[in-house]
């Protein structure tokens, strides 16, 4: 298998800086933007304590304000996973972020793709 050569000036640090600058343009601080870029690059899902650990802050008003603002602006949606006050997952879903960070970073997946990925598992369950 032959892979194409990367561009001569390609640099992951430069790419991360460009993505962070694009997210900062939406009114987030640099610390918040760096965290959002990390989340968008990987899974698109996070919990509050991950933000606190990333930012080096304790649970309190700042993280709550940040998460509330994400949800109110429609950039994320909370997912309740269990008992009340036992934590929530946040799923980033804002299309403007993904457009401005070069490519869609897989923060949102279409239902069709999810069905396609789940089809082999569903077939296994029905035969047993």
Image: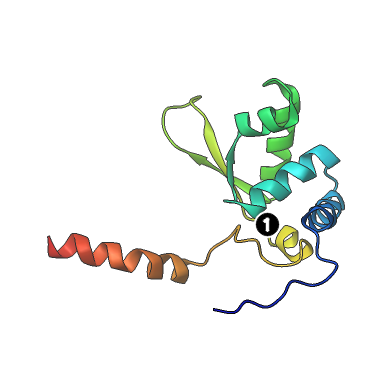
State the residue at coordinates (68%, 37%): 67
Residue with the most extreme left position? 128
**Does residue 52 show up?**
yes
Q: Between 72 and 22, which is closer to the camera in this rendering?
A: 22
> Quick check: 127 left or right of 46?
left
Residue 71 placed where, x, y %?
A: 66, 44
Report the quarter where the N terminus lies.
bottom right
- Residue 62 occupies quadrant: top right
Residue 48 placed where, x, y %?
A: 62, 32
State the residue at coordinates (60%, 51%): 44
State the residue at coordinates (70%, 33%): 54
Q: Between 49 and 75, which is closer to the camera in this rendering?
A: 49
Residue 110 placed where, x, y %?
A: 51, 67
> Quick check: 126 left or right of 18?
left
Residue at mark 1:
94
> Quick check: 27 left or right of 66?
right
**Does residue 73 show up?**
no
Residue 46 vertical placement versus 6 (above, below): above
Give the secondary structure at mark 1: loop
State the residue at coordinates (74%, 71%): 6
Residue 50 vertical placement versus 128 (above, below): above
Residue 106 vertical placement versus 40 (above, below): below
Q: Between 69 and 24, which is closer to the camera in this rendering?
A: 24
- Residue 61 occupies quadrant: top right
């Amino acid at each position: 298998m032959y892979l194409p050569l990367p561009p001569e000036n390609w640099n992951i640090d430069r790419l991360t800086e460009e993505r962070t600058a694009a997210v900062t343009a939406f009114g987030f601080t640099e610390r918040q933007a760096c965290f959002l870029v990390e989340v968008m690059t990987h899974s698109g899902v996070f919990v509050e304590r991950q933000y606190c650990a990333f930012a080096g802050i304790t649970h309190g008003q700042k993280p709550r304000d940040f998460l509330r603002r994400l949800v109110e602006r429609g950039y994320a949606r909370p997912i309740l996973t269990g008992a009340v006050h036992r934590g929530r997952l946040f799923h980033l879903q804002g299309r403007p972020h993904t457009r401005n960070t070069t490519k869609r970073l897989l923060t949102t997946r279409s239902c069709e793709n999810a069905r396609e990925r789940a089809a082999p598992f569903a077939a296994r369950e029905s035969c047993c």
